[in-house]
Amino acid sequence: MSNKSIVETFNNKPLKIIFERIIPFILIAVFTVRIFCYQSEILKTINTSSDGPTKYMYVGLASNILGNNALALLVYIAIWLEYVAVVLITLRPFFSFKTIRNLARFVCGPIFILNLALVKPIVKVLEGTNNFTLLTLMLILEASIGLIISVYYFIKNFKDKNNYKTILFMFGMLLLLMIPSLPKFFVQATYGLGTGKIITAYPYDLSLSHRILLYIGIIIPVAMYFLLRNKSQEVIRFTLIYVSIATMIGFISRYDYTSFKEPWAWPFHLCNTAMFIVPLCLIFRLKKLFYFTYFINVLGAVFAMLMPNYNEMTPLLSAHTFEFWYNHWIASFMPLLIVALKVFNRPKIKEFYWSMLWFFIYFVSMLILNVVFTAKGHDVDYFFINSDFIGDKLGEWGRRLFSVKATINVGGLNLTFHPLYQTLFFLVYVALGLGVWFVYNEFFIIADSHYELYLKLKKIKLDKLAMQNAASPERKEKLMSENREAKFELKHFSKKYATSKVYAVKDANLVVNAGEIFGFLGPNGAGKSTIIKSVVGIQPITEGNIEICGYDVATESVSAKANIGYVPDHYALYEKLTGREYINYIADIYEVPQKERDERIEKYVHLFELEGSIDSKIRTYSHGMKQKITIMSALVHNPKVWILDEPLTGLDPNSIYQVKECMKQHAAEGNIVFFSSHLIDIVEKLCVRIAIIKKGQIQCVKTVEEIEASGITLEQFYLDTITGKEDTTHEKDSNWKQWF
């Protein structure tokens, strides 16, 4: 079997369902069960060091168990990388950009192979035994399933071409993805248990080390924002979903499940809840719940980082310190990034009201849990509303507020409340939340205006450089010498108008090759003209890229437009000129040699029967004649990509025939003809391939032969597609709800 047939086999729908839905679900299930069942064993093994953490620096405990420092370090790295690989493989079906394809192809497979090769030492480190146990079986099963999926993606994306830049970017992305996946026990077993003299600097109040950690918490989100702000929404959502899910898994892996039967030890603290709420909001687009994290979690996390709940004896490089800052960084900057990168809209005051309602429910629930568990003799303090922790930080007046008590006996339990302290706590938090909303809102308004100004200045600068380069003799000579193949490509193109919150076109991908007559179909308002106008440079691109003959329309607009001939749906001509003068004017812009333009003008004048009117003023022309002049001006420079938007409107039957013949001839010469039309019978007779767009999304791309082979006409296929009766082939990777 050839490579081509193997790739095609792995791209069929049944295999996609198996390898991209069923098997990844099994993988994440095995991974979750393993983490859940063996977390307490891992922690127990790590805590077997009798000599204290000072003896086992760096790979301390594992090196003691295995008797080999290098092997111990490799074991920890293998476990760490498997966290990354499992999340990547699970997310891969929903995202199709090149970096994640490369990671699934080239990186995940070797990671799973490494874990298979190191199963025995991994089990010895995690469980303290050389015997074949259930943990051994689960690790082998987990790595084997992951390897199978990796092989599938390697074959599926076999045709992908990469250069050294894409490979370097892939490894850079891998390093970034490793950060939120760092397991707790890696730090714990490496640097000790947090009780020895590992480092003498302690994060407390606003000491130097405490400030450093606060600065890191600011630098990380700022860096992520600048790295992601110009990326597509698909890349942004993948990155944020990955970080949030990895954080949640990291939190789960750090949680001591021996306390699971003790509700007073459950992770109900405000910043802990953010670990679960944020990924759910991103995956299922839960806007109202998300704004709870935006107003409440961020504020709580910031307060916690300013007043950490550990003392001055906690080492900087300890598991507890790492866990505390890791959780609170995510809870503080993730919601802000989500809004700043426009995954969710900037909230209005009504969203603040909803978040306060959620906060009231949370506050009352935690207050009740606190007083009940405290009455039963358990040390519990969710959100620090049942202790004097914050009162101590506020000074004497805070302690006095806390000293006012109210005790209620319920079912034999004495429930103790601190009404003044707790009421003031709630009201102050609500007031601060309102203030935060005002600050956030003003900040984003200022940021948006500055960013718009930056984009305008950047565009002016680029346009100026483009004009200078285009006018230079060197550039002209280069363009003449370049003989690029005709090609038209949309890459994750999206368009949203400034006054609208809805995308006119969303994540459109399309490739049209040399020699094709390509039909573009869709109902009115579907997005056909939006795409065409963006291709020819009439309106800017919101997201993604458009390439004409390898030139990016946004950054190499002059070169791209030099290869385009455009016939709009509504002609726009200089009507005081004659037909010949206008065509010569267009030819001057494209610098067509005099001899060539004269030959082409005479050819098309004869073809469209304009001999008696070509030298008359355009204002005297009929609608059909004006359309002919528009077509002639689009062809005078012999463009490699001829784009027509409803070109046959107003033409007589003979002219329609001549235009069709021009299309055929132009494509036969190795050029592209791309046109939209409502005349489906003409599209069916002319086109090699067609695309159908509906509500801003390309539903399918098929050859006319494929449609005819299915036993239905193009007209029927089109109607079935736009009415939703046809199961289209367009893969909506970002639609998470299809999983559930």
Image (spheres, grey):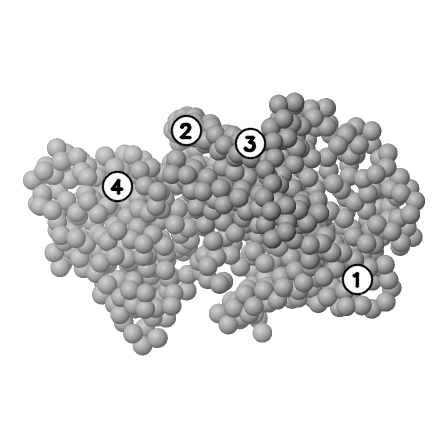
Q: Position of residue 601 (x, y in %)?
A: 21, 44
How far apart are the two marked residues, 3 and 1, measured between alpha carbons? 57 Å
- Mark 2: few/some/many CA within 10 Å (<14, 14-19, 20+): few
Find disc 4 in the rendering and name its residue.
597
At 25% from the left and 57% from the top, the residue drawn is: 523
Find disc 2 in the rendering and name its residue.
445
Give whichever of discs 2 and 3 has the lower sequence position: 3
Find disc 3 in the rendering and name its residue.
420
How far apart are the two marked residues, 2 and 1, measured between alpha carbons? 53 Å
Kind of residue at badge 4 = Arg
Q: Nearer the viewer, mark 4 or mark 2?
A: 2
Q: Nearer the viewer, mark 2 or mark 1?
A: 2
Q: Position of residue 135 (x, y in %)?
A: 76, 64
At 27% from the left and 34% from the top, the residue drawn is: 588
Q: Is residue 133 left or right of residue 396?
A: right
Tell me if residue 183 comes above or below residue 467 in the rendering. below
Instruction: Say if mark 3 contacts mark 1, CB within 8 Å.
Output: no
At 25% from the left and 37% from the top, the residue drawn is: 586
Q: Nearer the viewer, mark 4 or mark 3?
A: 3
**Viewer-side residue, 79 vs 189:** 189
Give whichever of discs 4 and 3 has the lower sequence position: 3
Res 158 → quadrant: bottom right
Q: Is residue 331 visible?
A: yes
Tell me if residue 182 comes above or below residue 435 in the rendering. below
